[in-house]
Amino acid sequence: MSRIGKKPIILPQGTKLELKEGEVLVTGPKGSLKRPFLKGLDLNIDGSSVTVTRTSDEKTIRGYHGLMRTLIANMVDGVSKGFEKKLEIVGIGYRAEFQPGTFTFFLGYSHPIVFNLPEGIVGGLEKQTQVSIQGIDKELVGQTAAKIRALRKPDAYKNKGIKYADEVLKKKAGKSGK
């Protein structure tokens, strides 16, 4: 049996989890999320403890057991605490501006880049070079942060660009002269 799949999910105070018509609905203080529940798995709700069990030992169902449990646990964490990704902009003249719902990035190109945030994501600037992305859906927060980072990935020689705040970059040595 999957080690991750058999771990129980503990529901925090004020969080509800329901299984309706093949979909898991999680509601909490920060909002609600729903996701399709995979066939071949069962959801057992006992008060504030939830476990995911499988109905058979088919290879695909075994593979999805731990995945489904982790997805539900992430939904529970999202509606109770939320998720956040921080990005840093490195480079002379590189900066960002923020109006509600949109970022404008100045990344050394001939034009500014306007980035509209998807629904369910809240952004902000701590400084002109520190961007923060917050939301209740872990998948959407990570995807949005990855799209912003892809606007100007850090280069290998000067490390200029947009990087995650906890990312460690290795600088390559340039050409050696004779």
Image: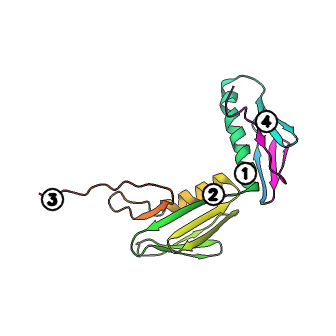
- Disc 4: which residue: 51
116 is within the stretch colored magenta: no
In the displayed structure, would residue 22 be above or below residue 53?
below
Q: CA distance from mark 1 to mark 3?
A: 53 Å
For badge 4, the amino acid type reads Thr
Residue 177's label in the rendered image is 3
Image coordinates of residue 8 in percent, x first then y, are 76, 37
Give the residue number, with chain letter if any, for mark 2.
141
Task: Please identify the quarter of the rendering in which residue 117 is found.
Answer: bottom right
Q: Is residue 114 visible?
A: yes
Task: Name the residue rendered at 64%, 52% in the picture.
Answer: 139
Q: Are marks 1 and 3 in contact (CB under 8 Å)?
A: no
Quick one: SS at disc 1? Answer: helix
Q: In this figure, what is the number of numbered marks?
A: 4
Q: CA distance from mark 2 to mark 4?
A: 26 Å
Q: What's under tag 1, amino acid-wise?
A: Asp
Identity, as a three-letter code, of the amino acid under mark 3: Gly
Over which residues does the magenta segment extend?
A: 1-29
Q: Nearer the viewer, mark 1 or mark 3?
A: 1
Magenta-drawn stretch contains 8: yes
Give the residue type at disc 2. Answer: Val
Mark 2 near mark 4, Cβ–Cβ under 8 Å? no
Residue 40 visible at all: no
- Would you say 119 lies left or right of 171 here? right
Give the mark toward the camera: 2 or 4: 4
Residue at (49, 65) in percent of width and height: 88
Q: Earlier in the sequence, mark 2 or mark 4?
A: 4
In this figure, which residue is indicated by the disc labeled 1? 77
> Which residue is nearer to you in this view: 64 or 51?
51
Q: Earlier in the sequence, mark 1 or mark 4?
A: 4
